[in-house]
Image (spheres, grey):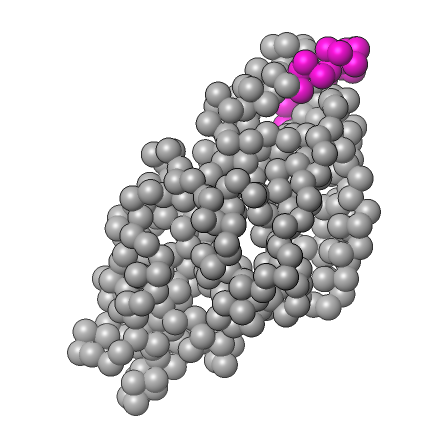
């Protein structure tokens, strides 16, 4: 989400005042519920080269917008004119009350939803806090140029967070923090304030390959190289068409996203549960029965996912994902009845995946 505010005049602050302002921004951010704030410049040439290689290999799949945005993603001033600094904020999201991921993965009749999507849509939560932080800065400086971003614009958020000292990009391509693991959201304020920048954090993956070894579909094709076309998060969230048949059995009971590479990371032993009530699980999505979710009609889906990141995939993709999980579940009367109830669904996409799921149980639609 992007929020345009005052284009602003140039702020005339001396070096000492800017240093104090940088420290105060971090304190104000912590008071607003962020766990860490860092400040980076906008030089991302190395990350731009990595992005261009990734795109040239076709690893972005059907996410055409990744290529369409061009250098606006890696050159902040091309996205927001006048940007010379990026304030990055980190907010933990691991819900303490959620049923443990490994338990849900071990129950094939139960759906697995990525931990980040169990509660309220993080875009709204972070956007509101970052907007409040920007207004607090404005009280100190007067009008200045800024925009707030939360994961819905062409922003290299992990690269900027790495530069700002919030962590390093791990072999699974997620940001890792030595004291907090990786269960956190990121948000940014692009600004024209010449704030002092933080030092990048050193890399601490070493020789560990647990994330690579744990990926169910082999999407981490090499350290720091992710083929999104094989990633379960891409397949269940970004992809709008048919999930490739060879990959369907590998999804298991994962119906929205995948956390396997994070779950096995040794640094996540230091992850701290969130205190944010907005990130608490809703509608028992931390341990939902697949047949129950498959029975949701579109109005119920829209009602139960109101204010949730899940809603963006739409009802048809929701049913597509669950049909695959039901195809991977043990054969039972409840599973077969659920699948047959959608065999004549209006959506070709849903019908195709239901037929596949029934065939997994030795049946025809």
In the image, which residues are magenta? 3-22
- Identity of the residue furthest to the left in this view: 333
Above/below status of 107 relative to 312: below
Quarter of the image where one finds residue 25: top right
Position of residue 238 measured from the top left corner of the image (x, y, whole percent): 53, 59
Tell me: 132 left or right of 188: left
Above/below status of 296 relative to 37: below
Of residues 59 and 301, the one nearer the viewer is: 59
Q: Tell me the quadrant of the picture where the C terminus can be found.
A: bottom left
Please say whether residue 15 is one of the residues in the magenta stretch.
Answer: yes
Tell me: 240 left or right of 327: right
User: Which residue does the image show at 30% across and 70% down from the upper left?
Assistant: 108
User: Which residue does the image show at 64% across and 46% down from the upper left?
Assistant: 168
- Identity of the residue furthest to the front in this view: 207
Tell me: 91 left or right of 193: left
User: Which residue does the image show at 45% across and 57% down from the upper left?
Assistant: 263
Asked whether residue 14 is in view, the answer is: yes
Of residues 77 and 15, the one nearer the viewer is: 15
Position of residue 148 measured from the top left corner of the image (x, y, whole percent): 61, 31
Of residues 184 and 255, the one nearer the viewer is: 184
Asked whether residue 299 is in view, the answer is: no
Please say whether residue 239 is one of the residues in the magenta stretch.
Answer: no
Position of residue 122 measured from the top left corner of the image (x, y, whole percent): 46, 40
Above/below status of 69 relative to 357: above
Q: Tell me the quadrant of the picture where the N terminus can be found.
A: top right
């Amino acid at each position: 989400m992007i929020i345009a505010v005052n284009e602003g005049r140039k702020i005339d602050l001396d070096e000492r005042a800017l240093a104090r302002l940088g420290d105060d921004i971090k304190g104000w951010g912590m008071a607003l519920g962020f766990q860490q704030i860092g400040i980076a410049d906008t030089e991302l040439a190395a990350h731009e080269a990595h992005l261009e290689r990734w795109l040239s290999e076709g690893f972005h799949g059907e996410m055409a917008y990744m290529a369409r945005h061009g250098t606006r993603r890696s050159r902040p001033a091309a996205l927001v004119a006048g940007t010379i600094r990026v304030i990055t904020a980190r907010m933990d999201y691991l819900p303490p009350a959620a049923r443990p991921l490994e338990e849900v993965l071990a129950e094939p009749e139960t759906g697995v939803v990525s931990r980040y999507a169990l509660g309220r849509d993080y875009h709204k939560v972070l956007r509101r806090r970052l907007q409040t932080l920007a207004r607090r800065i404005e009280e100190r400086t007067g009008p200045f140029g800024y925009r707030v971003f939360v994961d819905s614009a062409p922003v290299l958020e992990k690269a900027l967070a790495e530069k700002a000292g919030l962590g390093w990009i791990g072999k699974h391509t997620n940001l890792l923090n030595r004291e907090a693991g990786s269960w956190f959201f990121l948000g940014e304020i692009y600004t024209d304030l010449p704030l002092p920048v933080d030092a990048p954090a050193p890399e601490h993956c070493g020789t560990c390959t647990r994330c690579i070894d744990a990926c169910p579909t082999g999407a981490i094709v090499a350290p720091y190289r992710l083929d999104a076309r094989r990633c379960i998060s891409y397949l269940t969230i970004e992809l709008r068409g048919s999930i490739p048949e060879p990959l369907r059995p590998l999804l298991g009971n994962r119906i929205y996203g995948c956390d396997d590479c994070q779950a096995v990371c040794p640094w996540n032993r230091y992850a701290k549960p969130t205190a944010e009530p907005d990130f608490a699980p809703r509608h028992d999505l931390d341990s939902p029965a697949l047949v129950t979710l498959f029975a949701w009609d579109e109005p119920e889906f829209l009602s139960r996912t109101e204010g949730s990141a899940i809603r963006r995939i739409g009802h048809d993709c929701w049913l597509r994902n669950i049909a695959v999980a039901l195809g991977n579940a043990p054969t039972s009367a409840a599973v077969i009845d659920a699948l047959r109830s959608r065999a004549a669904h209006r959506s070709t996409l849903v019908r195709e995946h239901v037929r596949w799921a029934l065939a997994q149980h030795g049946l025809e639609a």
